[in-house]
Image (tube, rainbow, N blue to C red):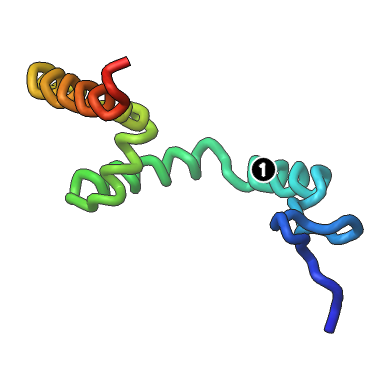
């Protein structure tokens, strides 16, 4: 059997690569350059109109995509409404129980 790829701590052992990694930057830039040449302003406009038409026809995925790009993704909000009186009573009871166990010192 081949030697272990990871040590006991879960990290890759010295001399073991973790995986293929990302493509070389030059290859990535070549793909991006090809994409920019292939997508003309006219084809981009046509695709944008198609996305809008799908959204107006009720396609939920198209609506989400359109809104995400037009408006940005919504910010997650956390409802911080807490019954502080109830929380205070529970906290006080917990503290009293903790301090009564050690003799009140």
Q: Which residue is mark 1?
A: 37
**Camera sees residue 38:** yes
Quadrant where the image shows the N terminus: bottom right
In the foreground, 65 or 46: 65
Element under disc 1: helix
Q: Position of residue 50 (x, y in %)?
A: 34, 48
As displayed, is residue 28 above or below residue 92? below
The residue carrying pointer 1 sits among few (fewer than 14), some (14 to 19) or many (20 or more) residues within 10 Å by Cα, namely: few
Q: Position of residue 42 (x, y in %)?
A: 49, 39
15 relative to 31 in the view: left or right? right
**Camera sees residue 79:** no
In the foreground, 53 or 100: 100
27 relative to 83 in the view: left or right? right
In the foreground, 29 or 100: 100
As displayed, is residue 16 above or below residue 42? below
Residue at 15% over, 18% down = 88
Residue at 20% over, 44% down = 56
> Can you tell which quarter of the image residue 68 is in?
top left
């Amino acid at each position: 059997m081949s030697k272990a790829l990871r040590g006991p701590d879960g990290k890759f052992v010295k001399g073991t690569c973790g995986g293929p990694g990302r493509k070389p930057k030059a290859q990535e830039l070549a793909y991006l350059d090809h994409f920019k040449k292939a997508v003309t302003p006219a084809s981009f406009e046509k695709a944008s109109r198609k996305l809008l038409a799908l959204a107006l026809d009720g396609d939920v995925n198209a609506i989400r995509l359109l809104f995400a790009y037009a408006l940005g993704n919504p910010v997650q909000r956390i409802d911080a409404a807490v019954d502080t009186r109830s929380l205070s009573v529970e906290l006080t009871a917990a503290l009293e129980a903790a301090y009564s166990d050690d003799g009140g010192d």
